[in-house]
Every structure is written in structure tokens, then in C-alpha cells.
Image (tube, rainbow, N blue to C red):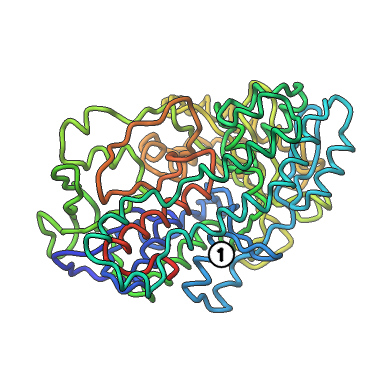
Amino acid sequence: MPGESRLRESYDWIVLGDSPAAILSAALVAKMGLSVLLVGDGPEKKWTLSSSGQVIDPEPNFISGLSLSGPRSGLARKCLEHLRLADSEWAILSPERAAFQAITPSIRAGFEFSWQSLSREVQREESGLSGFVSELIRVMESNSEAIHGYWRQLPQRLTLAAASAAEQTVEKREDLSKVNFTSESQIYRELSRELTRMNLDRAWSDLTGDFRNLGASQKDLEWLEAWLAGALCSENPKKVSAYELLQALVLAHDGARCRGGMSGLRQLLYRVAARSGAQVAGPGVGVSRVFVEERRIQGVQLIGAEDSRNLTQARGVFTSRHPESVLTWISSEREQSRPYPTSCELLRVTIALAAKSEGIPVGLSERAIWREFGAPILEIERADPGEYGFLNTGNQFIFIRSYFPMEAIHWPTHRWKTVCQRMYRQACELIPFLEENVVRIFPDFRQQEFEAEWTSYYSQMELKRVEAFRAPVNVPGTPFLPQIEGLFYGHRSIAPAMGWMGEWAACLNATAWIAHRSGISGPLG
């Protein structure tokens, strides 16, 4: 999509980054009638076609909070409905038939969207379970409507009625912008009371506590860890509170897939943002600095545009760029002195297969999670070639992903070759007859070309630079990010325990702020 290269001197809203939530923010603010500049990587695909002709997609294709069917309307779906997607645009999204399958040394179960189906899976695996998981499912089912209700009402709580907004004085608008519109204290208290009434383990009464302290058996923990890994599309978080666990698992029932993976969703949202009036920066336009004075955002310095200025002013900035990048942009040396901790992330590595369809077991979910104590998770995702715009020749694409510590960036190629062999071998153990039906592998550890293929796609610089190769993980403590008025962070590492829901909420918080500061109704007003 060609972008405009000639920039204005100032904008109401500048969006830096191209996560789906960031592009959605640009579209929603532009639809309010405010001036918006979107500086992303462009709608180019994140997946690519390898030298051997194999599609490799580094991003999991699962979006929580985007309910497309049933009585509930997911948070992201509400936003897309407000932007008036055409029927053909809705067609790239499809509800998941099942959230995912989880496989551990002692469990092989489907995590369905129906609580009844999930309960049946637990009963089938009852041996070794203490009753904890069954009780948890009952708690989740009884509180599902309250949790969904909170998130469904988030846009309304962030949105002023148009008539009410028109009556506000400037002073009142300023006060209004300081209100914490996203407080979850009420639902937290209600949930605490409900859990207490149900006479669960006393640890549940402290919802801020680590869920591993709730008295579950080892097999119960296997369920929970596999469930969280599938729901959040990342390695199992090291620290998740019981409250976060309840929300994340309930909200994961609102999942959807996209044709073309996350790249397909980005391309769709770029079109919608441009149609709504956002100016999309042209190719090669980037950020070199973010200007802050007295802890208020002033604007950004852009590079690569025809008329790049020292300062492009902005009333507000929303960024989904990696926090490490944001810290280097902020003009204060004091803010730059505290680097973003690498312990907050993992490397996500994918090997891609093409396999004959007859070799895929009937009933295998689009996503499967292998979880074994002490080892990284293995995520297996399959897709029809048609989802990526290719003719269906009787093959299916299979993406095998796993997660590694950031220091793995420095591993030599021969070690990565061994890692890929192990990932593939584990996938073959989980999917019977897969090995006999594989047509292509990339990078192909069976061939001498592995080193060249690995380096062409996963060079050390690419592993450091490309967001799609990095995944957040929850760790004790909050990563340092400076609190600056008018600067909003939408990167997944800000709230990794909430997965996509954390990004959608960050998007709506930010768009509500600029709306209230402008004296107009909020994101969906």
C-alpha cells in the first residue's frame, strides 16, 4: 500500500508500530475525525516463501478476544464492527473450531470453547487429578459472564456520550482525562466473594497470589500450564496470579483465526485505517527520537520522509514497538539509563513443513501444544495452502514452534541444527505417520544446505531485530517503562498474562485519552 511521504507539521495522534492493536488505534482515532499518522513496517507480510518454495510463518495464528459467533461479542470484534468492515473483509476471519489441543506426558485433551466439553475432557483424564481442575472449570463457568461482561463494557466505560461530551467545559475535560477508566477493582472484589462462597482452597481468596500455590496436584499443574501456553500463544509464564489465570483462560474462549495468519489481519487493518482517514507513512519512514518535556509528549523525529523535520508535533503517541526501542528514542538520558530486561522475553523459532493431507490424523486441531516439565513448549499449527493464497495441491502447511532464552541468539548454527532435529522428532512422535508424509522442510536439517537456509532467515541480527521472533514472558516485577503524559505502550510484554486482551485494552485506553482531551466521544462513540 503506497503511503504519503509528505508529512504535516503536527498530528493529533501518531502511531508507531504495526501490531494489530496499534493499527486499530490509528483507524479508531482517524474515524473520530482527528489527524493521525501511522508509522509502521507497512502491510508487507511477515510470513515468507523460502528458497525451497516453503511458506514459513513465524507468528501463531490465534487471536483471543475476537469472538465471531455465539451470543458474546468480543472486545476486538466490537471495534471492527464500529469500523464497518465489508462482508469480504470479515471473510478473512474464522472462528476456531477448538481453542487447541494440549498434550503432556500424561494428558492428551482438547481445550474446547464449551465448558461442558471441557468438563468431559477432564472426566476422561480423571486419574491423577485432584478435583482442582474440575473445580476451576466450575468457577470459570459461573464467572464467565461477569468477566466477559467487564471486557465487553470496556468501550462503553471509555466512551462519553456525544451529548455529554459537548456539555463539558475545558476544565472538566482536563479532570476527566485523569480518571482511571479501566479500574478492575469492582470485578476483582466480586470474583473474590464468589470464590470464597464456593469454599475453594483458601489460597484462592488471595487472587494476587501465584496460581502454583493453590494446592493443585502435579497433574493439575500440567493442565494449567498447557492451558495457559495455548491461551497466551507463548511459553508458559513464570508468574501468573490466580486472577490473571481466571481472566486469561475465560477470554481465550473467544478465539479466531485469520486467512494468511497475523499478516492477513495487519493487511486488513492497514486498509481500514487508510479508509478511515489515517495517513500511512511511506516505505522507509522510521523514528529516530521521541521528544519529551516536563514528562509530557511533544512529538517525534522521523527519518526517511521527503520533508523530514527535526520535530513532528503530536498531542499523543501510541507505540507497539519493542520497549527497548522506545527507551532509546526518548530524549532524556536518564530515561535511557535503565535498559529493558531481556529476562522478559524468549526467542520464538519456527520450522515449516509441507505434508500430504492424508498423513494428517482426522480430528487434529489447528493448534496443538506439547508441554513437558523442564522443557520448552512445542506448538504445532497447521493450515491449508489456500489460507496463504496458494492452490491446494493435496498438501497442508505445518508450523512447529518452540521458545528459547534470549542468550540462544549466540548459539552456533550446528547447535540450532540439533534443536531443529529435536523439534521435528517430537512433532513426529505426536503426529503418527507425519515423517512418511513430509514433502518439504525449512530450514532443512537433513541437508547440507541447512546452514545457508538458517542464516538466510535466522541470522543473529534478524533474531535481535524482528519482533515476530520474540515472545514476552511473565516474570516477577514490572519492567521499567517511563510514565509520560500522552505516551501509551501497546507492546505485548506490558501485560503478557492477558495475551491479546492486554493489547486491545491498551489500544482503547489510549484512544479514549485522546478523545477526552479533544472533548469528543470516545473510541466507539
Query: 163 or 436, which is in the foreground?
Result: 163
| Image x and y of residue 22, in percent | 39, 56
Quarter where residue 427 is shown: top right
Q: Residue at x 38, y 31 (%)?
A: 479
Q: Is residue 393 left or right of residue 511?
A: right
| Image x and y of residue 62, in percent | 60, 52
Q: Is residue 47 above or below residue 369?
A: below
Count of numbered marks? 1
Query: 334 or 289, which is in the foreground?
Result: 334
Quarter where residue 239 is shown: top right
Query: 523 or 118, which is in the foreground?
Result: 523
| Image x and y of residue 392, in percent | 69, 65
User: Residue pushed farthest left?
Assistant: 310
- Quarter of the figure with the C terminus: bottom left
Q: Residue at x 89, y 27 (%)?
A: 127
Q: Residues within 10 Å of mark 1 (few under 14, many from 20)?
A: some
Q: Is residue 105 above or below residue 172?
A: above
Q: Is residue 151 left or right of residue 39?
A: right
- Quarter of the figure with the N terminus: bottom left
Q: Residue at x 65, y 53 (%)?
A: 397
Quarter where residue 107 is shown: top right
Residue with the mark numbered 1: 77
Q: Is residue 156 above or below residue 220?
A: below
| Image x and y of residue 491, in percent | 41, 45
Q: Is residue 272 left or right of residue 300?
A: right
Q: Residue at x 19, y 58 (%)?
A: 304
The amino acid pointed to by label 1 is: Arg
- Looking at the rendered structure, the secondary structure element under dot 1 is helix
